[in-house]
Amino acid sequence: LAKTTQPISMDSYEGQEVNITCSHNNIATNDYITWYQQFPSQGPRFIIQGYKTKVTNEVASLFIPADRKSSTLSLPRVSLSDTAVYYCLVGDPRALLQAGTALIFGKGTTLSVSS
Amino acid sequence: NAGVTQTPKFRVLKTGQSMTLLCAQDMNHEYMYWYRQDPGMGLRLIHYSVGEGTTAKGEVPDGYNVSRLKKQNFLLGLESAAPSQTSVYFCASNQRGTVLSYEQYFGPGTRLTVT
């Protein structure tokens, strides 16, 4: 399984754009990059997934360079409610869908948004 | 849809007591998982199930037992609780299929304290 490295914590103010970078040098050909968000006292929640280039949804954007050795989660105009832990995961969705497999969560990045 | 629900939300046990945590999902998912999350750490897989009547060990299975008698329910049992089992327990599920999504659906968690 590809190991990921991301900052332990980040601080931001409301209205700013936040970019969280994740390093995954050993990513395999079939691996996808997925980000989860966890609010205090809640379970993790899937927010975005990508394989290469750029993916955007209503919550965030995910930028993946051509070599796929890193990725950047971008949160536009954060608010206080975006304060959470953000986890970068790398893995093969086929393993999850065909055999069931554990998601490997590291320590994540704790994002604190202030007013 | 309620998604993934967990019962109870909080519990305090004395060392040596037993209890069962209940997880229920209404999404008709094949795969179900039990994780534990300790302060400042990622989630670790305890046991999982790939279908009704089947269970398998995860990374940290000692001290726990599980059962999946019905597809929608996954029970986690502690036969003789120990202080080292103080943690937050999350249940998760995902479908079996071919749509390439690395998404597991998590419950709200059960906070267990063993004194």
Image (cartoon, coloured by chain):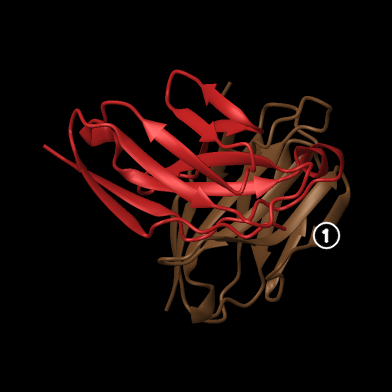
Chain colours: A red, B brown
Q: Position of residue B33 (x, y in %)?
A: 69, 50
Residue at screen point 54% across, 73% down: B85
Is B99 on the left or on the right of B111, as rendered?
Answer: right
Front position in the image: A54 or B47: A54
Q: Which residue is disc 1 drawn over?
A: B56
Count of marks placed on residues: 1
Mark yes or no: residue A10 visible.
yes
Q: Quadrant of the C terminus of chain A?
A: top left
Query: In the picture shown, does residue B114 fall above or below B112?
Result: below
Front position in the image: A21 or B20: A21
Q: Position of residue B79 (x, y in %)?
A: 67, 73
Is B68 on the left or on the right of A20, as rendered?
Answer: right
Tell which subunit mark 1 falls on.
B
Displayed quadrant of residue A31:
top right
Toward the top, the furthest residue is A58
Is B111 on the left or on the right of A112, as rendered?
Answer: right
Residue at screen point 61% across, 49% down: A69
Q: Quadrant of the N terminus of chain A?
A: bottom right
Q: Position of residue B8 (x, y in %)?
A: 50, 50
Category of crowding for the residue at label 1, using alpha-carbon neighbours closer than 10 angstroms: few (below 14), some (14–19), many (at least 20): some
Toward the left, the furthest residue is A115
Q: Position of residue A39 (x, y in %)?
A: 37, 43
The kind of residue on which mark 1 rests is: Ala
Residue at screen point 35% across, 48% down: A40
Query: In the picture shown, does residue A97 fall above or below A60?
Result: below
SS at badge 1: strand
Query: In the picture shown, does residue B13 fall above or below B36?
Result: below
Mark yes or no: residue B2 visible.
no
Query: In the picture shown, does residue B90 fall above or below B31?
Result: below
Residue at screen point 49% across, 53% down: B110
